[in-house]
Image (tube, rainbow, N blue to C red):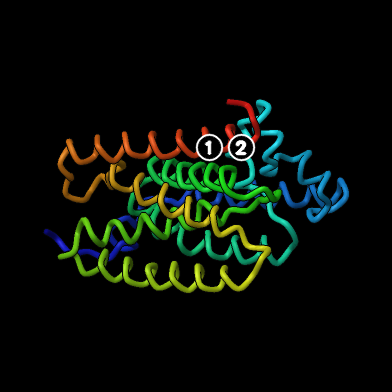
Amino acid sequence: MENFNIRKKFRRKRAVMTYLFLAIQVLAFVLMTIYGGSENAFVLYLFGAKVNEAIAFGEVWRLITPIFLHIGFMHLLINSITLYFLGIELELLYGNLRFALIYLLGGLMGNAMSFAFTPNISAGASTSLFGLFAAAVVLGRLYPYNPAIRNLAQGFMALIIINFISGLTSSSIDNWGHLGGAIGGGLAACFIMAPRLEAVERSFRIKMFVGYILVVSVLIAIGFFRYGVI
């Protein structure tokens, strides 16, 4: 297989979705600040944070909207920096729409797992960011003989481990959301192919797609069950 430098190979492409996601979360933070502050529970609820009771009673869009909300400036800053550097690398590789889909599917799975196992209100792009970390690691497994992909994967595997360990030391971090994001992004990367990399067997991709649907459905069902909806 041809070896390549990601930025050089795709220099004519633009990381449109990375910049769009950054703009949305910054705008959301500014509006939340105007309405009373991003650490205000009512403001978080108003803007679409993950609130289990609200999801259980029909507001399922809260499994997506928390991706774009942040609790405090430092939360926004750290996630924005991570999204900028990680997002550009993967978006240049996957293309705009495929990258956006992996980002959203990772976030959805992360919020679904948080809904199933964590009662606390939560928000943040880290569910999707863990999905991107995992997608990079999966690429390293799918294309082990490509040095650029392999090096990218090894770096992000280290970041996943470091972030999980740091999360265990803080009660304010939604580790279930991080774990779900990683699982969702990893599965998504198995059935969403980077267009200029060698195609993976179709049957494998179908199995991973079905696996994603099953896992996210079970997690949402667990959340509904815990709140007596089913």
User: Distance of mark 2 from mark 1, alpha carbons?
Assistant: 6 Å
229 vs 165, nearest the viewer:
229
What residue is shown at x 51% (from left), y 72% (from top)? 165
> In the image, 129: left or right of 121?
left
8 vs 51, nearest the viewer:
51
Q: Which residue is mark 1?
A: 222
Asked where in the image residue 138 lies, by quadrant, the reply is bottom left
SS at mark 2 in the image: helix
- Up/down of 2 relative to 200, above or below: below
Kindly indicate whether the residue at mark 1 contacts the one at mark 2 (C-beta within 8 angstroms).
Answer: yes
What residue is shown at x 23% (from left), y 60% (from top)? 141
Residue type at mark 1 is Ile
Residue 28, percent across and down? 72, 47
Residue type at mark 2 is Arg
Residue 19, percent across and down? 55, 51
Asked where in the image residue 61 lies, by quadrant, the reply is top right
Label 1 Cα crowd, 10 Å radius (few <14 / some 14-19 / many 20+): some
SS at mark 1 in the image: helix
165 vs 9, nearest the viewer:
165
Label 2 Cα crowd, 10 Å radius (few <14 / some 14-19 / many 20+): some
80 vs 96, nearest the viewer:
80
